Amino acid sequence: MKLIQIYIRLLSILIIAVMSLNTCKDNDSDSPEMKKYIDDLVKERKEKDYSLQFDINSPFNRDTTITFNPLNYYEPNPEFIFKSRLIAYDIQDTIQILGTKGESRPTILLGYVELAKDNKVHRINVYKSFDRTGASYYSIWFTDRTTGNETYGVGRYLDFQLNENPDFIYTIDFNKAYNPYCAYSALFTCPIPRADDHIDMEIEAGEKNFH
């Protein structure tokens, strides 16, 4: 049985490595596809700035002690776009995640994705949470070697859209990593990534520290 599990694990790593090679080809910075991707990403960032500045539910409008400034980002970097299946845990435990105000949040540990870079495979958890209405949503919360230096000290987030197909190949794009609202205002609380959510590399993509 152990031999079968080892074989499956090695096969999974090989598949991820092959997908990563294909991703590198698809993410050629000079390709028309990548140029369109960068244009769309820059547009999304400008739209987020606009929303944070003018939306009445924005932390900058709910907290009158803070001043809006355009968000800081790394330059778009195709090296931090990955492909992976979601590997569901056999037992999807409900665990308690701490918020930045000390509160406990029940959260389901759904599974993980694997990121192949520089001859290493990194595992990062996917969580299922529930909003105040009871609706479910899925997230990746992470820290990395930039955390507390160039990026927010609590960690950063990625939204995750679950696909019901267990063989679906997800795009994990760290250029879309963002800060939670607690990075801008102490009025807000946000989940704190656990030690298991640390990625042992410098993810120089996505949102940086706020001013």
Image: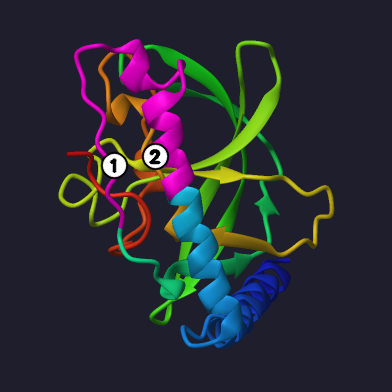
Disc 1 to disc 2: CB gap under 8 Å: yes
Q: Secondary structure at mark 2?
A: helix
Q: Which residues are magenta?
A: 46-73
Asked whether 56 falls inside the magenta stretch, the response is: yes
Image disc number at residue 70 = 1
Q: Is residue 22 shown above or below 48?
A: below
Q: Is residue 26 left or right of residue 3?
A: left
Q: Position of residue 162 (x, y in %)?
A: 72, 45
User: Alpha carbon of mark 1 to alpha carbon of mark 2: how far?
Assistant: 6 Å
Q: Is residue 105 left or right of residue 88?
A: left
Q: Amino acid at mark 1?
A: Pro
x and y percentages locating residue 53 in the rendered image:
37, 29
At a point 61% along the width and 45% down the height, the residue shown is 160
Q: Which residue is mark 2?
A: 49
- Which of 90/39 is in front? 39
**Quarter holding residue 135:** top right
Q: Is residue 167 left or right of residue 109?
A: right
